[in-house]
Every structure is written in structure tokens, then in C-alpha cells.
Image: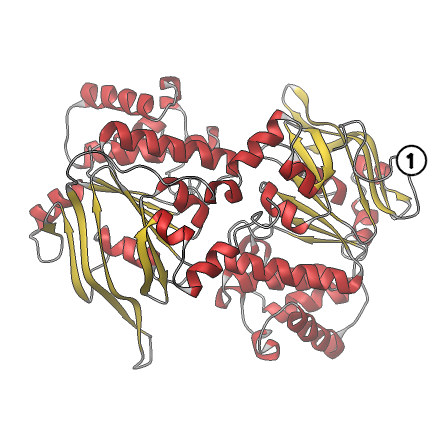
Amino acid sequence: MSPVENPVGNPGGSADELLRVRDLRVGYRTGAGTTEVLHGVDLTVRRGHRVAVVGASGSGKSTTATAVLGLLPGNGRVTGGSVVLAGEDVTEALARGDDRRLRRLRGRRVGLVPQDPMSNLNPSARVGRQVAETLEFHGLARGAAARERAVRLLEEAGIPDAARRAKQYPHEFSGGMRQRVLIAIALAAEPDLLVADEPTSALDVTVQRQILDHLESLTAARGTSLLLITHDLGLAADRCDDVVVMSEGRVVETGPARGVLRAPQHDYSRALVAASPAGAVAAPARPLPAGEPREVLRVDGLVKEYRVRGQREVVRAVDGVSFSVAAGTSTAVVGESGSGKTTTARLVLGLEDPTSGTVLIGGESLTGAGRQRRREVRRGLQPVFQDPYGSLDPTKTVERLVDEPLRVFGVGDTASRRARVAELLDHVALSRALAQRRPAELSGGQRQRVAVARALALDPQLVVCDEAVSALDVLVQRQVLQLLDRLQRELGLAYLFITHDLAVAREIAHDVLVMRRGQVVEQGRIDAVFDDPQHEYTADLLSAIPGRAAA
């Protein structure tokens, strides 16, 4: 393990260094002056090597990448240090914001695979056109030649039937396929260095593995170096030669990736390792609550069919699903996108009616109940959704967000509701001083705690968590899972936890259902299913968890 003073690579500078960053400092201009957010970052990427920069949200890892690329926001500037790319010192261009010079480097010398394909692809332009534009911008091909080359790049990135799909728009692609398009764009000009900023954080583990396998084979074939930005140390150990661990704008540890995973030297690195999915999968099963279990949710023979518009074809999204959840326990529903797990959650919440089958909440059915009775039954179950940034109204204060269910159901008066909000904020370990803040003033973890507080406002029997921690980095994810565990033990809550992440399921659940193509392929106690999977699909999901091979 190398200390902070000895960054990854050869500190003296050598011919095999492709990217050399020394004492990099970045500041953001505010009304009060300039606030420094990077405090002397050092890292080196050698030719043909793969280096990961890891850390939680706010650690400075993405800021480091955008600074090197000259893509900082308008109020951001490189204020110190040096950046040398392929022997060319670009420090002055970065400090001055010389976009003309930097644009010659981006694409040709450095490619970027950003995190969110939907916000980084033009929704109004065909996919093939977007790849061809990169070729045309750098003068590599024009017209028909650019279009043909774009199709070949899409094929190389793993897009099936690329000639046809090049004529489609981004919304016609899955998340994994959109990410492959971004890879094709990034590699179009055959850059020396590829920067991948959380390229698979929103993808299922099996799709993540496919994308990273393909990215690895493409970069190896071209001899391209890789700078991977990720919050997941397990993923870094699986995919990279070296790792740079960042916290609060500083490098706290560097070294061989697997060495850092197995024997981290810094307390922060140890915290990342402890929160990594590989460690969670090996954890012991959660004990069941004492006493006779009281059934809160029963699902029998649940079926949901959709008719494809303009066709006679019927798609069965949920196909004969049955399970139950007892008070004080958690049942996880796991599977890839399209497996039917989120549709199952929507049916349980009464947001959609099943084609057939029954959903009983505390022994009562939402289907067929009168409006008033349906409203009362719904009061006993509450959702926590995936996106803490999109599920909270940005115009409302925390107090108004949390007391909204109380107002909707006419519970209490203004004073009692305010007292209840204070009690709920205590429950989720948030300061009461946050009550008058709005979501934009909160971190992602704080926002999700607000969502949990809102879900608890009406004292529900069942909380349905639909990918409730998938948008959070591993440290904040662990904090929210520990919060949910504590609340369950204190309040006797039942959880239905929808997730594509089996490591999260192991940490939160007593029982698990594994879904594929609308059907349950395996179910049972979490330890039995995880320790001895009977279905090959379950085994494949488990094998795709990052870091297991390196641990």
C-alpha cells in the first residue's frame, strides 16, 4: 500500500505515463469568494493501465475527472497544480478555460462515458446520428462514411442489429443499451484515455457486468487506458489495476486495487470496504422477531397483463406470484429490470389493479373495496420510492412534505401535525432545524430520510420500498439500511423491499423472492437462497456482485 505522498504510478514521470496530475486544486466562485473543493490531488494513469478513483458522494472524485477534462461548471476553475496529458501540459488551458484547445483533446485524446445516458444523449436525435457527429467533429469521417462507421461502432459496443437501431431514438433503448451508445461515442475517435464516470451505477448487476466486460475488451483491444470513477471499491478491485481513494477533496490512500480492498490502511478506506456489496453478501442472516408472526401482507396468484398498443399481443408482466410478509419482517423481491418486481410493488400499493389474483393488507383486499374502505386500507401501507431527488416536491419545506399524509387523511390540527413532524424527524435521525428547509438544501441521504419520515406519518403496517437505496452511494446506502432496520425493530414494521441488488437484499431482508420474466423462480429464507441457490438465474445474479472475486 503506498502512502498518500506516493501517488499511483511513477512519481518521477516516465514515458509510459499517459495522464499525470500533481497537486491539483479546484475552487468554485461564490458570493463570498472562492471555495476550494480539491486540495492537492495526485494521480497517474500509465499507458494500458486501469485506475479507479473511489469515494462517497462529495469526495471530489467526479470533480477531479471533470477538471482534467476541462468540463467544470462555469463558476469552477483549476486554481493550482498541474495536469499533463500524453506529454502535453494542459494546466494553463484548464486554468484559463481555453475551450478551443481543450476541445481538440476531448474525444481525440480523452473520451468520456458519463453516468446518466438519458441526460447525456439528445432525445430528439437518432442514435446513429449522435455517434456520426463525433466522427465528423474530429474530421475522421463525413456523410455516408460517418454513418457507416457509426453503425460499426455500435456493433462493437454490443448493440444487436446495429444498422436498424442506429435509426432509433434514445427512448427506444434500455438503460444498458443507452450506456453502450455512450461507450460507442466515447471510443469513436480511438482516444488514448477513457474516463468512465459511474458508468453502470443505475444498472442491474448482470447488465453492469455485461457493460464492464465489453468496455474492458474494447479498451484492451485498442490499448486504451481507463480512469474509472466509482463509489464502489469492490467494483474497482474487480476492474482496475490501481485505486485512488478520495475523501473531502483529498487523496487518502492509493495502491494496487485488490490490495486496498483486502487490507485498507486508512479509516475511510476501511469504511468503504465494510459498506461494499461483497461484504454484505457474506453477512449472517437477520434474526426473525420473537413470538407468533402476524401476517400483514398476503399475495396469492397475482397476475398482471398489458396489451401492446396497436397489436393483439398481451404481455404478462406478473405471472402467478404468491408470497406473504409478517409484522416485523422484511421480504425482498429481486431481479433484473423487466423481471416484474416493480409491477408487483405497484399492485400491492393499489396503484394498479391485477388482472387476476388477490392482495390482502391486514386480511382486507383493495380490489373490490368501496372508495372509503379502500382509502382506509391504503392508510396502512406507504411507499418509499427510488429517487430522493425526484420523489420530493422541490417547492415544499420538509415540514410540509412530512405532514402531507396527515393533511390528506385529515389527521390532527396544525399544532399536533407540527409536533408529529418533529417526532418523525427524531425517528429518522434528522435535526428538527431542517423542518423549514427545502429538498435542494439537503443531501441525497437526508432526502431519503425525509421520504422515510413521510412514509411513517400514518403509522403504517407495511412500507413498500421500491429501489429505495439504489440512487445512494455505498456509505449513505448503509446508513439508510441501518435506519430502516432500527425503525423495524422499534415499530414492528413490515417491509416489502424491491431491489435489483442482492447485497442490499441480504442486509435488509429475512425472506427473498427471485423474479425473472414475471415469475418467481426461487423463494425462501434469505440465507438458504443465497448460500445454496437452486436456480441458475439466482446463481448468476450472485456471481455478478462486484468485488466477490477480489475479496
Q: Position of residue 35 (x, y in %)?
A: 67, 23
Q: Does residue 545 lie above or below 459 as drawn? A: below
Q: Residue at x 59, y 32 (%)?
A: 58
Left/right of residue 479 with respect to residue 31 in the rendered view:
left
Q: Nearer the viewer, residue 513 or 54?
A: 513
Residue located 65% across and 32% down the image: 264
Question: Which residue has dot 1 on it?
Answer: 12
| Quadrant where the N terminus is found in the figure | top right
The secondary structure type at the circle numbered 1 is loop
Of 484 and 537, the residue lying toward us = 537
Residue situated in front as seen by the camera: 229 or 217: 217
Closer to the camera, 189 or 479?
479
Q: Residues within 10 Å of mark 1 (few under 14, many from 20)?
A: few
Q: Is residue 153 above or below residue 20?
A: below
Percent across and percent down for residue 291 are: 17, 35
Location of the C terminus (image quadrant): top right
Image location (x, y in percent) of residue 76: 69, 33
* Rendered residue at 31%/37% (across/down): 287
Q: Examine the rendered structure and indicate whether residue 34 appears above or below residue 142.
A: above
Q: In which image quadrant can residue 484 be found?
A: top left
Count of marks overlaid on the render: 1
